[in-house]
Amino acid sequence: MTLSHAISSFVLALAAYRNDALRLPSSPSDAGADADPLHGALDKFANSQLTMQSDLQSDLDDGVQWAAKVGESITSNRNFSKSGSVVIQSWNKCKRKLEHYGAHYTDSVASKRYNFLYFDNVKAASSSIRYMLSKFLKIDWQHTDIEGARPTGQRFSSKDFNDTTHMFKFSVVRDPIAKFESGVRQARFQNSKYFANMTADEILKDVMAKGYFTNEHLQPSSFRLSAYDASTPPSMHNLDFIGKVEDIEHDWSIIVDAMKGIGEGTKQQMKTLQKLNSRVEDPDTVLSEAAIQQMCNSDMYRFEWECFGYDLPKVCQE
C-alpha cells in the first residue's frame, strides 16, 4: 500500500466531523445556550458540516510543506524565530484576555501511557501530527488508553479527559494570516454551496458580522487553544508547550522527546513529520490589506499576534 493510500484510509476513517465550538457565545455564562433560536439554527448548520467527508488530495493544507517555503515566500515583517518554550510565555500572559470567547472545547488527542494531551489546531500541522500519533502510538481522535474516557461526540475533546494536570499539554500554531487563508480554502471545499462564491475578504467580513465562526477552519489559534477542561465549573486548560508551524521540524522534535514511554527507535521515526500539504492557492483566498487591518482590529482575531509572538503586519502598524 502506498503512503498516499495509507493516509487516505486513515483520513476517511476519521472523516465524520464534530465541532463543539463553531460559535462565539456572547458571554461565558451563556456558553452552549441551546434555547436561543439563533444558536439552534447554527447547531443545525454545524451538524450538516460535520457529516462531510474529506478528500486527501484537496483537504490536507495544514501548513507543513508551506513552512518549508516560508523563507522564500513570506515577507520579512513576520517573526517566526521564537521557539515553543518562548511562545508559551506570550500565551500565558495573553490567554486571560480571551475569556470573552466563553467556555468552549477543542478536539483533542490524549494518552496516559505516553503522557500527553494534544489540542488540535486546524490548519496548523494538525493532519500531520494526528497521522503520526495514530501510526506510531495508535492514539487518535477516537482512541485513547485513558481508562473511563468517553467522547461526548464523534471525537474526543478537551473536556473528555479527567486529571490532565500531570500530562504534557501541547499544540502548534501558524501565522494568523496564512492560517485564515488556508481555512478559507478548506471551508470552500467543505461547503461550496455557502462559500464558493465568496472571497477571503467576504468570508472574514461574514464571520465578523455574524459573531461566530461559520466553519471550524476559520477559528483562530487563540480560540482553539483557549479550550476548557472537564472541571466544574470548567476552567481553561494550561499548556506546557506551543510550537510553530514555521519551526515545525525543530519544535516537533521537542514535543516527541517530551512524551514518555516511547522507544528511541520509534521516537526517531516519529520525528520525521509527514508533509501532507496539497491545496493550491488562488487569488480569491488571499486577504487584502484592508481585510488584514480589519482582522487586526477584530475581537475575534486580533489576539493572534500578541498571544503567539508573531509580528503585527505592517498594514496594522500604520
Image (cartoon, rainbow, N blue to C red):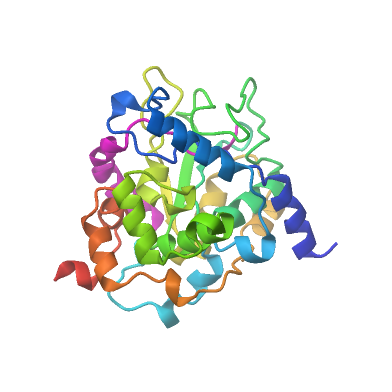
Residue 257 in the image: x percent, y percent?
Answer: 55, 50
Asked if residue 178 is positioned above or below residue 19 in the image, the reply reads below
Q: Nearer the viewer, residue 231 or 23?
A: 23
Image side of residue 9 versus residue 88, left or right: right
Q: Quadrant of residue 228?
A: top left
Indicate yes or no whether the magenta region holds residue 176.
no
Residue 74 in the image: x percent, y percent?
Answer: 38, 77
Looking at the image, which residue is at 48% across and 34% down?
43
Q: Residue furthest bottom?
A: 72
Q: Which stretch did the figure color magenta?
A: 83-111
Q: Number of marks in the image?
A: 0
Looking at the image, which residue is at 36% across and 19% down?
233
Residue 300 in the image: x percent, y percent?
Answer: 30, 48
Q: Residue furthest right?
A: 1
Image side of residue 94 versus residue 25, left or right: left
Residue 289 in the image: x percent, y percent?
Answer: 27, 72
Looking at the image, which residue is at 44% across and 76% down?
283
